[in-house]
Image: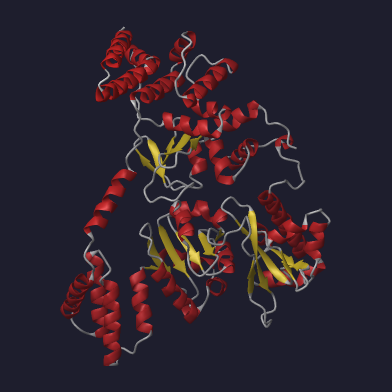
């Protein structure tokens, strides 16, 4: 086990870390007022409700309620313990971590997911060793070197080689006492007709696939023999740690560059991503299937609002690009196309033309989707033929009519007019006719559906309502945390909150300031380290309230009285309810008794 991390080291990491620097690795943030906002990484949303208070070094999502300090963020984002989160944050900030604080535990843990993560990490090390250090890896290493992949790049992507051996990896894990149940869950093995396990990957260059945090969760194996009848690429099946619909190849390496360049390049294959990375284009990713899923798009939306598609330049690649553009309809993004000349794929283009030309292509050669689509249509028609001309015009107008910008519409109408050698006026008339036709065919809005949608939009933005009691508790606790004299007065008065959530945080606050000998304002981010997750969420919510800089003594007194009198107010409401019932049944005696109680409770409240 790792040595317990002392408070002094935690304090050092905290003092040298800005929560904005850490969270911006995961979320695209924009300044709004004094705080920063972005799309919450813990749930899907279209309107940013995730906020960071840089002055307090805390985060809070106004939608899902999660909140805390930088360590809580890493714990939830990467499923780490508090000590692991401290180490992670330290490493992110290039803060030296003493060896005794690093985990020395090499045993597999009980959790299936943690076991599988450890297995994939160990398998990657084994494959890397075979590639770089053994005779078995000679041919695979030559293949990679012939593709201009040197040792540094191989190391960056953790590339390895799985030899043509049915049981090498299987025996490796059996020697480590991994149960057969876990071996079957791992996806690293297949089974024959007799139900016996064997290595899934054999005689393949092994490319590790990582999650957003850099943990290896799957492999893609590329065959070396081009003439072989087996599939060129073999990917891991889905497992408890690998969901291909959520995973983007190279996202962990590309995140920083995606944010800095304000765009992501979507490549068709893993080797294209690696070749581009070698050429200095490091904001590239690849999906695990033919199109981006909603989950993958959501992950990207936290980093950028621009997606550029860069598929192969041959006919299948052009077809794939067109299909991708028809599927990329998420209005959170704008889209572009990087077309590779001479029917080459990105790797071929880089090797023949060089890194500088490829960088220039990705920076300055981005087409709009409509520009690519018009070129795509043009490929399929002979514009010297009248029939083809009309078909080309019809398809082109159905794309142009989707555009919103008058400038864009005018530009592409002019382009089609030039292609067909007709006037822009004639094209615009056709376009107007198409608009009228689409307006007629468009179904009328259902009034009830419109009303329901409007209601949902309004209610989605309504903040939770608190009664007078709970408002008083929330505001009083806020001032007690931020002003020592308030908490001292409350402690001396033997005060208690009505709701246990607020009392629990108040008790933890008193214990914390006593233990740390704090006589001044509490550092909220540090205080969070002693709270459980639910209390961290609540504290972050309280600290994100829009509060004035100072309080008044009368305000504090009112809050205290509201809380102390809450029982009496409940009695008052109860008596009034009983009076109504007594009046209905005509019980005059009960009404008289209740009125006496009502007067007495009101007298106490007035005092």
Q: Nearer the viewer, residue 363 or 252?
A: 252
Q: Residue at x 51, y 61 (%)?
A: 284
Q: Position of residue 21 (x, y in %)?
A: 50, 41
Q: Residue at x 43, y 73 (%)?
A: 323
Q: Is residue 109 visible?
A: yes
Q: Position of residue 173 (x, y in %)?
A: 79, 57
- In the image, 114: left or right of 332? right
Q: Position of residue 36 (x, y in %)?
A: 40, 40
Q: Nearer the viewer, residue 458 or 396?
A: 458
Residue that protrudes farthest toward the bottom in the picture: 385
Count of numbered marks: 0
- Residue 479, located in which quarter of the rendered image? top left
State which quarter of the image contains the N terminus.
top right
- In the image, 325: left or right of 112? left
State which quarter of the image contains the C terminus.
top left
Q: How is the image coloured?
A: secondary structure
With respect to residue 74, does 277 lie above or below? below
With respect to residue 386, does 1 lie above or below? above
- Residue 54, located in which quarter of the rendered image? top left
Q: Position of residue 24 (x, y in %)?
A: 48, 45
Q: Nearer the viewer, residue 394 or 243?
A: 243
With respect to residue 460, does 599 lie above or below? above
């Amino acid at each position: 086990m790792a040595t317990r991390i002392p408070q002094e080291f935690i304090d050092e990491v905290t003092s040298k870390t800005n929560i904005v620097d850490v969270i911006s690795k995961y979320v695209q943030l924009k300044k709004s007022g004094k705080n920063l906002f972005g799309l919450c990484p813990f749930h899907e949303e279209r309107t940013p409700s995730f906020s960071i208070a840089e002055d307090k070094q805390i985060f809070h999502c106004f939608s899902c309620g999660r909140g805390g300090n930088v360590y809580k963020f890493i714990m939830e984002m990467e499923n780490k313990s508090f000590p692991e989160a401290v180490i992670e944050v330290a490493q992110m900030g290039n803060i030296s971590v003493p060896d005794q604080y690093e985990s020395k535990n090499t045993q597999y843990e009980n959790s299936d997911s943690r076991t599988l993560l450890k297995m994939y990490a160990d398998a990657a090390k084994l494959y890397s060793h075979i590639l770089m250090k053994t005779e078995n890896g000679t041919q695979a290493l030559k293949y990679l070197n012939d593709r201009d992949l040197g040792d540094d790049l191989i190391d960056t992507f953790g590339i390895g080689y799985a030899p043509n051996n049915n049981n090498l990896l299987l025996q490796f894990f059996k020697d480590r006492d991994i149960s057969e149940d876990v071996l079957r869950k791992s996806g690293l093995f297949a089974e024959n007709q007799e139900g016996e396990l064997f290595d899934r990957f054999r005689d393949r260059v092994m490319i590790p696939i990582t999650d957003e945090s850099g943990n290896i969760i799957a492999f893609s194996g590329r065959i070396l023999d081009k003439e072989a009848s087996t599939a060129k690429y073999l990917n891991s099946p889905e497992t408890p740690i690998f969901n291909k619909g959520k995973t983007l190849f190279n996202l962990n390496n590309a995140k920083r560059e995606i944010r800095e360049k304000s765009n992501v390049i979507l490549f068709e294959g893993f080797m294209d991503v690696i070749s581009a990375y070698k050429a200095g284009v490091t904001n590239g990713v690849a999906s695990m299937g033919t199109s981006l899923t909603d989950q993958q798009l959501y992950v990207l939306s936290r980093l950028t609002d621009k997606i550029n598609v860069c598929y192969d330049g041959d006919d299948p690649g052009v077809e794939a690009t067109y299909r991708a553009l028809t599927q990329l309809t998420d209005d959170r993004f704008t889209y572009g196309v990087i077309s590779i000349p001479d029917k080459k794929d990105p790797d071929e283009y880089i090797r023949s033309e060089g890194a500088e030309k490829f960088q220039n292509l990705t920076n300055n050669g981005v087409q709009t989707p409509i520009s690519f689509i018009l070129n795509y249509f043009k490929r399929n028609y002979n514009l010297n033929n009248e029939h083809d001309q009309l078909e080309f015009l019809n398809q082109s107008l159905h794309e142009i009519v989707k555009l919103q910008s008058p400038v864009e519409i005018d530009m592409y109408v002019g382009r089609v007019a030039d292609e067909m050698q007709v006037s822009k006026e004639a094209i615009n008339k056709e376009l107007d006719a198409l608009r009228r036709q689409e307006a007629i065919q468009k179904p009328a809005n259902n009034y009830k559906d419109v009303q329901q949608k409007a209601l949902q939009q309004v209610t989605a933005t309504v903040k939770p309502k608190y009664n007078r009691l709970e408002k008083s508790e929330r505001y009083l606790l806020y001032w007690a945390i931020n002003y020592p004299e308030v908490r001292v007065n409350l402690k001396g008065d033997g005060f208690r909150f009505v709701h246990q959530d607020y009392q629990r945080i108040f008790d933890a606050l008193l214990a914390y300031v006593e233990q740390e000998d704090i006589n001044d304002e509490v550092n909220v981010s540090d205080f969070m380290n002693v709270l459980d997750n639910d209390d961290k969420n609540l504290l972050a919510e309280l600290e994100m309230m829009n509060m004035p800089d100072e309080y008044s003594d009368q305000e504090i007194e009112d809050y205290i009285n509201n809380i102390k009198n809450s029982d009496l107010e409940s009695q008052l409401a109860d008596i009034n309810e009983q009076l109504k019932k007594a009046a209905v049944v005509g019980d005059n005696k009960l009404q008289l008794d209740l009125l006496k109680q009502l007067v007495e409770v009101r007298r106490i409240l007035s005092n």
